Amino acid sequence: MKDQSIKVSLVLDDGQPVEAFTIEGDGGYVDQGINTPIGSYTIGSKVVGGGGEATAHPFDVTFPIHTDKFQHVSARFQALNIGHAAVNSYTYKDTRVINVLEKNMPLLSTLADKVNQTGIPGIDQYVAGVKAYTGNNEDVTKYISTLKTLRSEYAQMLSRGAAVTESDKAEAVQAIPAGLSGANYLSLKSQLQLEGQNIIDTANTTKNSLFKSTQESGSSNADPLGLGI
């Protein structure tokens, strides 16, 4: 409905709801060309709402959210005016992990061939912080820092919102090893991005399944099991 709006709020971890976006009934993302009668015989077997009718329109909107790091997130939807309002599904897109790979893998690829030519031993120990690199080769310093960032983000992705475990860190070391060629790091980027997107898609499928079951039960809680998805 054109005169209806829906406030979207997010709850990060144990915090309070914070408004993130307002869905406007007359926004450009609303398909005004499709009419859905509400309160008529087209839905159910009898007229509801005192016999009155209204027309709703479907919408599909994407909006960015910038936050600090968090482990759990839930969404809340609130109709701001009188009239029909419905959200059938919603999806999170964690672009941070994807963007980190997009930004850092080409840099790692460029540095890799330079560093491999230096024959610096014990790179993994430097990355893990077991030993401190005391050399003056700036390429090695950048290589260690970039590899550390990528492994940290990969371990976060593996944890799926929970605390990162030693197992996650160990798997990150295996997934993003030191000593590869520049070309191999670029090939690895595509593989890791695909894996990250698959994890995000799986979480969204589970979340929307729970969200729909909550709607059918009549509950107003957007995260009924407290899973933070």
Image (spheres, helix red, strand yellow):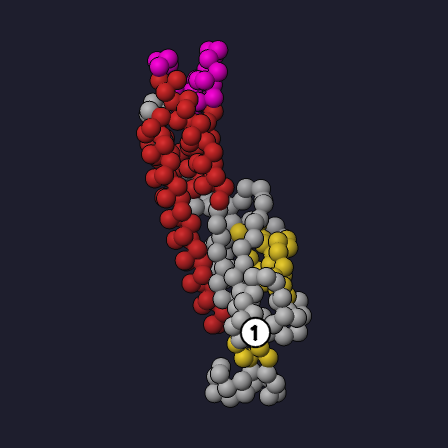
Q: Is 193 situated above or below 17? A: above
Question: In x, y percent, where is residue 181?
Answer: 33, 24
Question: In x, y percent, where is residue 129?
Answer: 45, 22
Amino acid on which the number 1 mark rests in the picture: Ala
Q: Is 12 situated above or below 192? A: below
Residue 188 versus residue 210: which sits nearer the camera? 188
Residue 141 versus residue 226: which sits nearer the camera? 141
Q: Residues within 10 Å of mark 1 (few under 14, many from 20)?
A: many
Task: Report the side of 119 relative to 150 (left or right).
Answer: left
Q: Is residue 179 magenta?
A: no
Q: Say which quarter of the image contains residue 108.
A: top left
Q: Which residues are magenta?
A: 117-143
Q: Is residue 124 magenta?
A: yes
At x 47%, y 21%, the residue is: 142
At x 37%, y 48%, the residue is: 198
Q: Is residue 156 visible?
A: yes
